[in-house]
Image (cartoon, rainbow, N blue to C red):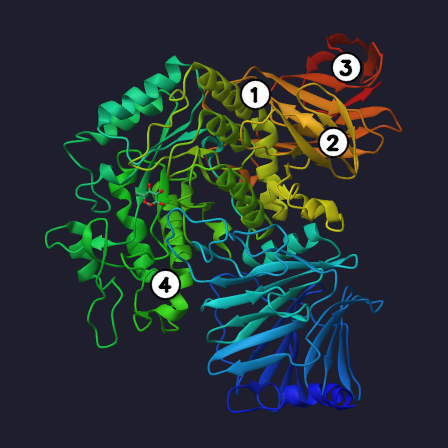
């Protein structure tokens, strides 16, 4: 009886304000707005805005809403709700795709499909509440609900049962469960009962997410230490739609320079000049393809940003032009801390232009990093961003085209910059508490915008360690200081995949592990998985042994060469996947949860690291010196890339996984465009594009994309795009008409048919064509790649 009374009373007890917690209270009134409504509740204001039929913003603050400002969001609300029904107990707001129900007492928000299927709702017992300045939103947790995303977070693919904090941190040798790391992306996707939704909490104060950790499966929650409860709800029909909407809201990447898709060699640090030249020569002599060499902190004069150490690099321009001539590009590291030293140009200039962050009262904040005592630019000030951008002449002048933004959490020894340090926040004025998590984003932005101007139309390559939501507009992200362990290799895969569902496509981890020495086998494994990672860079810490591909003996050198060759063969496919990402936000490395969210198997520990690389390739990453591994094949049928063996979907199978043959598969019906091996991306491949089509029972198409890879001329139509489609019912393969004004580097194509049976001939635009045998299941022919459509009937 007592239990019954308590159970009945519990919801009411929960909602009462008390000395510690204030709730939203009940609905009082509503006012229509241009794109939604503004509700007055007992303790707070709540705004519901229609950003699109599938993107709704909920903004809540007490007692009043503040001026809004976001570093992540680049869109304004568009249109309005189709209908707003004011009922006795609720308000119902309708779009073409969603019903937003505002329950009046106590005030709660609910999202359903137009047919009434519940997608997400505030937790029944309490929803929005404040403890001091911290605001939390509690949501109902569905029994079978799974969570993915939240950017660069360790732990499993399915984040259910875990809690996370967002506060960008410099954590060398981070462990399997370490949290937080370097990046804040407060965006996740919930999946249950054949529905999925996204939530993006756009608040850069310290935020917390709880996906049912320690709550006996009752609710999930998200909180911000200060500021508004300001979140976007994404209700598109499926996960690709949610990602498309999220990247519409926060922006998509521009195409990076083509060379940045190549193999990149880094070490802390290559110097002096002779070592760099020797490195470049070794790659070419050994015929191991490579596009990029990095200079870590030792290229600078006493670690002073925008300087060169004249003893080590007496003539950077001539060195860079030498390696450019060999097909290499140079990337240099850049840290935010400016050494306090009178007479050092960037210090004097920064002081003169008032560029550094200060305490209240005007004293400059000082922290120590590599150069010793430093001041830190306020990248949230537009003038400082401009000043920073212009300083890159010291690097672009001699010919640097890639800029590696490090230590930008910001990190200072001790890692505790006081919260009271003041930031401009683009004229909105704030403190470190709000600016910390967007510092890396704004440094990367300043770097990207500045170098883009200085490079006169060429695309800069920008890489960053710290970031906030929206970083994809400016920079690639690498996952910081990992270790040379098998666990780290698998964690790297999950970090990359999680960044991918969170809008950041161009990502990778230090190949081989930054700290420690990989075994030969681990290095070879990392090389093979790295090839199927958007950003492929080998990097090593100062105290670790050499990790260039030839440092592990002849066998591993050969395996490394073979894998890097494979990367260069894949470039026409990979660049097209990059292009797709610029159009739809779809990541390049795609956790299987994007396309198979309801398949329980893909979340199991054993299979959670499998992913699609682009739309056609399935990668089952293997670590360690094992000869077999268990692979789960999602729905469909899958051909092993190395031997065309066919595997049925929805099964798990033990397959061989020697070091030189990572389990990689192509979907049945898959279309894979390959080229000949080149030593770097400035070298022309053979003019014959290899189009591989893998037999399948359903239709498929692939957008093949090319442009000059160097400039932004593609934005004004200088690209070449063609739709390649396969229709098994009509027995046709069509290479669509070339669109755009860029002249393809391919003048011929070789069509390789995989597992199409014994056909020996077919018609190309009505003309008979004989097929040749390539391997047991492969037939091929070659023909010229004219601009008009080409129809192949088999
Ligand atoms: C940081 C970076 C690492 C770099 C090192 C020296 O630890 O994460 O990549 O090599 O600093 O600059």
Element carrying mark 4: loop
Q: Nearer the viewer, residue 545 or 443?
A: 545
Q: Nearer the viewer, mark 1 or mark 3?
A: 1
Mark 1 vs mark 3, CA separation in Å: 21 Å
**x and y percentages locating residue 499 in the rendered image:** 54, 49
Q: Nearer the viewer, residue 190 or 198?
A: 190
**x and y percentages locating residue 289 in the rendered image:** 45, 21
Q: Which residue matches tag 2?
A: 653
**x and y percentages locating residue 271 in the rendered image:** 24, 30
Few, some or many residues within 10 Å of mark 4 (<14, 14–19, 20+):
many
Query: Quick one: quadrant of the C terminus?
Result: top right
Nearer the N terminus, badge 1 or badge 2? 2
Element carrying mark 1: loop
Q: Is mark 3 within 8 Å of ligand 1?
A: no
Q: Is residue 131 left or right of residue 696?
A: left
Q: Which residue matches tag 1?
A: 660
Q: Nearer the viewer, mark 1 or mark 2?
A: 2
Mark 1 vs mark 2, CA separation in Å: 19 Å
What residue is shown at x 46% (from left), y 74% (from top)?
Answer: 225
Q: Which residue matches tag 4?
A: 380
Q: Nearer the viewer, residue 680 or 255?
A: 680
């Amino acid at each position: 009886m007592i239990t019954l009374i308590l159970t009945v009373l519990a919801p009411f007890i929960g909602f009462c304000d008390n000395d510690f917690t204030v709730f939203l209270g009940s609905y009082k009134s509503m006012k229509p707005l241009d794109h939604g409504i503004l509700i007055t509740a007992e303790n707070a204001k709540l705004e519901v805005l229609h950003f699109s039929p599938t993107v709704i913003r909920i903004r809540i603050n007490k007692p009043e809403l503040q001026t809004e400002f976001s570093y992540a969001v680049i869109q304004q609300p568009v249109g309005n709700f189709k209908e707003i029904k004011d009922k006795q107990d609720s308000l119902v707001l309708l779009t073409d795709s969603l019903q937003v129900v505002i329950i009046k007492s106590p005030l709660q928000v609910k999202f359903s499909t137009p047919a009434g299927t519940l997608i997400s709702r505030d937790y029944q017992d309490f929803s929005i509440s404040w403890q001091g300045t911290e605001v939390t939103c509690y949501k109902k947790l569905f029994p079978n609900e799974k969570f993915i995303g939240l950017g660069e977070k360790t732990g499993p693919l399915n984040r259910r049962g875990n809690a996370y904090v967002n506060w960008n941190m410099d954590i060398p040798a981070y462990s399997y469960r370490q949290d937080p790391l370097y990046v804040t992306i407060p965006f996740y996707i919930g999946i249950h009962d054949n529905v999925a939704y996204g939530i993006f909490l756009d608040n850069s104060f310290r935020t917390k997410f709880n996906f049912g950790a320690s709550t006996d499966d009752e609710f999930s929650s998200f909180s911000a230490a200060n500021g508004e409860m300001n979140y976007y709800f994404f209700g598109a029909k499926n996960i690709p739609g949610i990602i498309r909407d999220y990247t519409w809201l926060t922006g998509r990447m521009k195409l990076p320079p083509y060379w940045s898709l190549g193999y990149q060699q880094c070490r802390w640090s290559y110097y002096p000049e002779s070592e760099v030249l020797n490195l470049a020569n070794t790659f070419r002599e050994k015929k191991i393809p490579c596009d990029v060499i990095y200079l870590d902190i030792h290229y600078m004069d006493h670690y002073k940003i925008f300087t060169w150490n004249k003893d080590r690099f007496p003539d950077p321009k001539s060195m860079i032009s030498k390696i450019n001539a060999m097909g290499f590009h140079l990337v240099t590291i850049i840290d935010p801390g400016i050494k306090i030293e009178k007479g050092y140009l960037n210090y004097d200039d920064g002081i003169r232009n008032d560029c550094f962050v200060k305490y209240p009262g005007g004293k400059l904040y000082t922290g120590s990093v590599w150069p010793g005592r430093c001041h830190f630019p306020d990248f949230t000030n537009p003038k400082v961003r401009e000043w920073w951008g212009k300083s890159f002449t010291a690097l672009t002048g001699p010919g640097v085209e890639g800029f590696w933004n490090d230590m930008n959490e910001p990190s200072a020894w001790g890692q505790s910059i006081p919260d009271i340090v003041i930031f401009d926040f683009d004229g909105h004025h704030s403190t470190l508490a709000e600016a910390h998590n967007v510092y890396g984003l704004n440094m990367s932005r300043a770097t990207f915008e500045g170098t883009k101007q200085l490079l006169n139309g060429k695309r800069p390559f920008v890489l960053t360690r710290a970031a906030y939501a929206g970083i994809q507009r400016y920079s690639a992200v690498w996952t910081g200081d990992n270790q040379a362990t098998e666990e780290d290799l698998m964690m790297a895969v999950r970090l990359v995949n999680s960044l991918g569902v969170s809008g950041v496509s161009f990502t990778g981890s230090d190949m081989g592990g930054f700290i420690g020495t990989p075994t030969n086998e681990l290095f070879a494994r990392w090389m093979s998985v790295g090839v199927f990672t958007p950003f492929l860079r080998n990097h090593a810490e100062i105290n670790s042994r050499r990790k260039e591909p030839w440092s592990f003996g002849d066998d591993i050198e050969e395996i490394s060469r073979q894998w890097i060759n494979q990367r260069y063969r894949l470039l026409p496919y990979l660049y097209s996947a990059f292009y797709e990402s610029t159009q739809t936000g779809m990541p390049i490395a795609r956790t299987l949860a994007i396309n198979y969210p309801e398949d329980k198997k893909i979340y199991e520990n054993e299979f959670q690291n499998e992913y699609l690389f682009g739309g056609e390739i399935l990668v089952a990453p293997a670590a360690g010196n094992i000869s077999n591994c268990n692979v789960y094949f999602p729905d469909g049928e899958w051909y092993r890339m190395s031997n065309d063996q066919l595997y049925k979907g929805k099964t798990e199978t033990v397959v061989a996984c020697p070091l030189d043959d990572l389990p990689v598969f192509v979907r049945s019906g898959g279309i894979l465009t390959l080229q000949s091996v080149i030593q770097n991306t400035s070298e022309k491949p053979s003019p014959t594009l290899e189009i591989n089509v893998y037999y399948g029972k359903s239709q498929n198409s692939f957008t093949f994309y090319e442009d000059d890879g160097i400039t932004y001329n593609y934005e004004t139509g200088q690209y070449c795009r063609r739709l390649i489609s396969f229709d098994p019912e009509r027995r046709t393969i069509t290479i669509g008409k070339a669109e755009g004004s860029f002249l393809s580097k391919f003048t011929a194509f070789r069509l390789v048919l995989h597992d199409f049976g014994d056909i020996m001939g077919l018609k190309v635009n009505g003309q008979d064509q004989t097929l040749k045998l390539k391997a047991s299941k492969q037939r091929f022919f070659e023909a010229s790649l004219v601009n008009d459509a080409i129809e192949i009937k088999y």
